[in-house]
Image: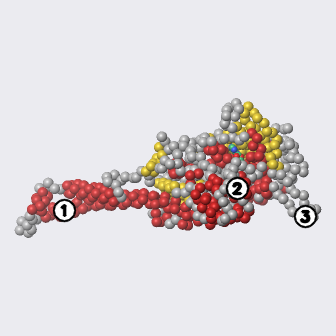
């Protein structure tokens, strides 16, 4: 067996074992395996083109690593390396001799002399503009990739992607199926996880098979295991089974637990570099308890990069719990499956234990409602198809309490706020965690953050979307968060200027079922009222908090302006008043009006220069200070504060067994870890 696995013909599946039924000679009917289907329609899983495939591969591997570390409550430490492989190295890897081009015009990136001349002229013009901009201190646009050279697919090249984590690892015998059988995974239960379909890692493998033909390599070790599993495999697309090249146990010298996956694929770093970096950055925002080390290695030193996203907190959100189905969310097929799988002997226990929100007495009432053919003690496995339909109909019509959000693990306001502050350093930020909602029987929690100002934030609304703690970067326009933020929030109402202010909108949705459009997990549609309403409410709640702060700021500024204006007129006013008083004090006796009491005393003091222009000026300044202070106090009192403006702090409920306490305030969330 050679080392790279290419050209191996290991453990060929036995012929005639295919499940495809024999077909009549003239039949045109064909079957497709899931692997074949996804290989032919890889765009629906986010593998649209080489660049996007590189992005999706990184994403799938990182998300698996996070799921894995979080599942054993270990703070994730993840290393992602993308190594560019030149065509020559790639050919050497697979044992292909590099060949010089002979007929250059045969190639897609061939450039005629005329086209070359035109391109060079364009480049020269661009360079001139850039030099001009640079001399004026302006930041010019980066040249677009198509001005760099002749057109063509030449931009794409090969990459080794390695993702190493400190997670759970995988059982030795399960590895081939986990990576080499489409639609196999450990996350199918009713639980909030990033992975769901049992597809992502296999798609990376299918793409490597399609683009480079080099198998995937997996190293893994379970906690406390004395060896490391190593597996090199590819996939038999036609039969949807793993094609194992090497599967062995190796000595684990480091006592490491986790997984390291290596895949060699075609990709495009130039066009997807910023998306990949954005993804890593946003992942760091939503999982500040993780540590990521991202490396890009290439033959060109100035392209290389190492970015460390440090851990900002040691507290992870609690591990999401597996839950049972809600009666309103099951279909006939699912009820039948639950009946087949249940260990409960009778109908009463089946209803009571296999679903949420059905107590014993409730189950008895439901059975009574099903009719005389049903009884509590009847064996659940004896139910006929018609009887199951009756149960299904009743589940549809009866009312049940909503599922609770206890099984969910939202990012938490603390993490969200920490991430926003770390990432954007805004001038103001507000966060809000909504109460659990329900969509088709699945609990759902929406959390939001709205920030104003900050570094590297564009004017207008900047949207950051997360679902089950995955950043969503594509299909932004159609997403429920974008639509809600741009169309259903009247920013003016909150004293925020939608066009001029730098607004950051962060929305994180967690659920046991995120209704993504497509398997690519790129966006959540805008057609689910429960979700769009919850998103709108959460953003509005943040805006309300911001409005209070903005109003305070505006009022403070108004006060300052008023004070500044009054102070500006004091010297003129003091001089004018003093001149009048001086005139009055100097008037000759007969002409002089008689002044009495305080007036006479004042004029006397002016005449004796006990009161001068400066005295008036000082008194006016003191008066303005006094009025300003009184107005400030009055405002603070109106707003519920006695002396200094005060803000409420409250304690979170301790019921859900989290070993920390959050102090919430409009200006901060403070986490106390006992
Ligand atoms: N780094 C890892 N550590 C531990 N287990 C892993 C790792 N990567 C993959 N697995 C296992 O392999 C299974 C298949 O992974 P795959 O990415 O194909 O699907 P998924 O994560 O279950 O779902 P999705 O297609 O939605 O991402 C996972 O369910 C998990 O059990």
> Foreground mark, 3 or 2?
2
Q: Tell me what residue is drawn at x 67 percent, y 51 percent.
A: 344
* Left or right of 663, for residue 267: right
x then y, percent, for residue 256: 67, 35
Q: Secondary structure at mark 2?
A: loop
Q: CA distance from mark 3 to mark 2?
A: 44 Å
Q: Secondary structure at mark 1?
A: helix
Q: CA distance from mark 1 to mark 2?
A: 107 Å
Q: CA distance from mark 1 to mark 3?
A: 114 Å
The mark tally for this picture is 3
Q: Secondary structure at mark 3?
A: loop
Task: Please report whichever mark, 1 or 2, sits nearer to the chain's N-terminal start.
Answer: 2
Q: Tell me what residue is drawn at x 52 percent, y 46 percent.
A: 657
* Residue in front for this viewpoint, 581 or 602: 602
Residue to which mark 3 is pinned? 27
In the picture, which quadrant includes the N terminus?
top right
Residue to which mark 2 is pinned? 379
* Residue 579: image tag: 1
Q: Tell me what residue is drawn at x 71 percent, y 52 percent.
A: 341
Circle 3 residues within 10 Å: few <14, some 14–19, many ≥20: few
x then y, percent, for residue 478: 63, 63
* Left or right of 99, for residue 591: left
Is residue 416 shown to the viewer in this render? yes
Q: Tell me what residue is drawn at x 39 percent, y 58 percent.
A: 552
């Amino acid at each position: 067996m050679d080392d790279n696995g290419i050209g191996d013909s290991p453990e060929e599946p036995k012929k005639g074992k295919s499940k495809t039924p024999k077909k009549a000679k003239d039949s045109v009917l064909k079957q497709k395996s899931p692997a074949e289907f996804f290989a032919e329609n890889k765009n629906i899983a986010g593998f649209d083109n080489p660049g996007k495939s590189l992005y999706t591969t990184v994403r799938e591997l990182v998300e698996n690593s996070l799921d894995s570390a979080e599942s054993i409550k270990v703070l994730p430490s993840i290393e992602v390396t993308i190594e560019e492989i030149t065509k020559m190295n790639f050919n050497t890897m697979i044992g292909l001799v590099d060949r010089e081009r002979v007929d250059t015009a045969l190639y897609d990136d061939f450039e005629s002399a005329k086209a070359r001349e035109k391109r060079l002229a364009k480049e020269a013009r661009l360079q001139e503009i850039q030099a001009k901009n640079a001399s004026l201190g302006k930041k010019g646009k980066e040249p677009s990739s198509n001005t760099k050279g002749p057109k063509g697919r030449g931009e794409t090249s090969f990459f080794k992607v390695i993702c190493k984590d400190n997670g759970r690892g995988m059982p030795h015998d399960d590895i081939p199926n986990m990576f080499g059988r489409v639609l196999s995974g450990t996350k199918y239960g009713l639980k909030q996880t990033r992975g769901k379909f049992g597809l992502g890692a296999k798609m990376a493998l299918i793409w490597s098979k399609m683009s480079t033909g080099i198998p995937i390599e997996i190293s893994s070790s379970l906690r406390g295991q004395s060896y490391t599993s190593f597996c090199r495999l590819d996939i038999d697309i036609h039969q949807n089974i793993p094609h194992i090249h090497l599967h062995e146990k190796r000595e684990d010298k480091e006592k490491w637990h986790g997984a390291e996956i290596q895949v060699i694929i075609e990709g495009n770093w130039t066009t997807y570099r910023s998306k990949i970096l954005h993804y890593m950055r946003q992942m760091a925002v939503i999982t500040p308890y993780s540590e990521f080390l991202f490396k890009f290695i290439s033959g060109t030193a100035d392209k290389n990069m190492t970015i460390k996203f440090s851990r900002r907190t040691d507290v992870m959100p609690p591990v999401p719990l597996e839950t049972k189905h809600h009666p309103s969310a099951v279909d006939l097929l699912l009820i039948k499956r639950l009946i087949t799988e249940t260990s409960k002997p009778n109908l009463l226990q089946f209803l009571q234990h296999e679903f949420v929100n059905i107590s014993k007495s409730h189950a008895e009432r439901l059975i009574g409602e099903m009719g005389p053919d049903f009884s509590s003690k009847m064996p659940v496995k004896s139910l006929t198809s018609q009887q199951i339909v009756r149960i299904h109909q009743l589940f549809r019509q009866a009312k049940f309490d909503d599922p609770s959000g206890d099984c969910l693990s939202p990012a938490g306001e603390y993490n969200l706020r920490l991430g926003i502050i770390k990432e954007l350093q805004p001038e103001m930020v507000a966060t809000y965690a909504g109460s659990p909602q329900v969509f088709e029987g699945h609990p759902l929690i929406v959390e939001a953050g709205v920030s104003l100002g900050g570094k590297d934030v564009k004017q207008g609304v900047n949207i950051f979307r997360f679902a089950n703690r995955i950043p969503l970067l594509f299909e932004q326009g159609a997403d429920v968060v974008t639509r809600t933020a741009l169309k259903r929030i009247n920013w003016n109402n909150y004293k925020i200027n939608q066009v001029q202010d730098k607004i950051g909108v962060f929305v994180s949705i967690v659920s046991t079922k995120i209704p993504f459009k497509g398997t690519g997990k790129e966006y959540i549609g805008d057609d689910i009222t429960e979700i769009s309403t919850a998103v709108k409410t959460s953003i509005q709640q943040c805006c309300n908090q911001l409005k209070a702060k903005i109003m305070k700021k505006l009022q403070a500024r108004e006060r300052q302006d008023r004070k500044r204006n009054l102070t500006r007129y004091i010297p003129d006013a003091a001089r004018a008043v003093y001149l009048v008083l001086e005139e009055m004090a100097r008037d000759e006796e007969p002409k002089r009006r008689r002044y009495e009491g305080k007036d006479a005393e004042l004029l006397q003091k002016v005449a004796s220069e006990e009161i001068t222009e400066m005295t008036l000026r000082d008194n006016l300044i003191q008066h303005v200070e006094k009025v300003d202070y009184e107005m400030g106090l009055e405002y603070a009192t109106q707003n519920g504060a006695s002396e200094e403006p005060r803000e409420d702090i409250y304690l979170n409920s301790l019921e859900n067994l989290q070993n920390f306490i959050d102090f919430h305030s409009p200006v901060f969330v403070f986490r106390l870890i006992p």
